[in-house]
């Protein structure tokens, strides 16, 4: 089934999810949920990076691999479709995104993407969900459950230990090692990819 990634993402249920699926329902707004997933993704995979980037009146929620390995179309499809499924389940009022971007070429099954009711772009530099900035304030359906504070503290503790182990210099070394063969590595380029200033 060439559209397996889209179908799998559509069938994602929180009960079957990982730390991201269990952490994100208890935040107040869509923007909080996106930041929560971006923050804790490293607990699930150290080969993926999620960033929230502003561009005028829009925000781009970008997903990319950090190990330099190209992902098959099914993986790109699953990432985007599963995030949209979580949004449909948990937002008080769901609205389609302004645009979806996929890193793979336009597939033969491109008609299946019509279900998302928005513009779809292929051959993009990264997988992304594009939204108006105003949508970041949209409320979520659920409130914090008993035990959520303890869950959050534990997740932060684990993430803190991982960050101490690697540190900023470790992240920079990793980016340089991954992209050195391209010949495009520079301080400005690395800073942009790590979403920080050159001075930092």
Image (cartoon, rainbow, N blue to C red):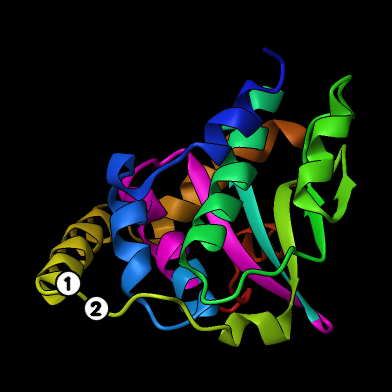
Query: Residue under circle 1?
Result: 148
The image quadrant that residue 158 belongs to is: bottom left
**Residue placed under numbered mark 2 in the picture:** 144
Q: Quadrant of the N terminus?
A: top right
162 on left or right of 178: left
Specify whether 50 is left or right of 190: left
Q: Does the magenta stretch include residue 1?
A: no
Q: Give the range drawn in magenta.
A: 35-57
Name the residue: 46% across, 66% down: 90
The image position of residue 29, as x and y in percent, is 48, 81
- 60 left or right, relative to 160: right
The answer to whether the residue labelled 2 contacts the one labelled 1, judged by CB atoms less than 8 Å apart, is: yes
- Residue 193 placed where, x, y %? 64, 58
**Does residue 107 appear in the picture of this structure?**
yes
Q: Distance between the residues labelled 2 and 1?
A: 6 Å
Q: Which residue is drawn at 63% across and 69% down?
A: 94
Seen from the viewer's position, the closer of residues 124 and 77 is: 77
Q: Residue at x 80, y 32 (%)?
A: 112
* Quarter of image, res 188: bottom right
**Residue 25 place in picture, x, y as percent:** 36, 67
Residue neighbourhood size for the residue with mark 2, other residues' Cα within 10 Å, grouped as few (<14), some (14–19), many (≥20): few
Q: Residues within 10 Å of mark 1 (few under 14, many from 20)?
A: some
> Can residue 125 be seen at all in this image of the molecule?
no
Q: Where is residue 134 in the image (x, y as percent from the top left)?
A: 70, 87
In the figure, is residue 143 to the left or right of 181? left
Where 192 falls versus 50 (above or below)?
below
């Amino acid at each position: 089934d060439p559209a397996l990634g889209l179908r799998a993402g559509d069938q994602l249920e929180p009960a079957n999810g990982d730390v991201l699926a269990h952490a994100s329902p208890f935040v107040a707004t869509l923007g909080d949920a996106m930041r929560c997933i971006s923050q804790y993704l490293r607990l699930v995979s150290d080969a993926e990076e999620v960033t929230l980037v502003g561009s005028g009146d829009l925000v781009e929620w970008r997903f990319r691999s950090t190990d330099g390995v190209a992902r098959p179309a099914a993986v790109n499809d699953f990432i985007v479709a599963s995030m949209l499924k979580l949004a449909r389940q948990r937002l008080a009022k769901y609205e389609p995104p302004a645009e979806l971007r996929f890193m793979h070429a336009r597939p033969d099954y491109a008609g299946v993407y019509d279900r998302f009711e928005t513009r779809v772009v292929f051959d993009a530099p990264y997988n992304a969900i594009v939204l108006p900035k105003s949508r970041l304030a949209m409320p979520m359906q659920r409130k914090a459950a008993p035990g959520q504070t303890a869950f959050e503290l534990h997740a932060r503790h684990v993430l803190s230990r991982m960050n101490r182990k690697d540190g900023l210099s470790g992240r920079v070394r990793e980016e340089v090692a991954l992209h050195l063969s391209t010949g495009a590595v520079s301080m400005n380029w690395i800073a942009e990819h790590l979403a920080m200033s050159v001075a930092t």
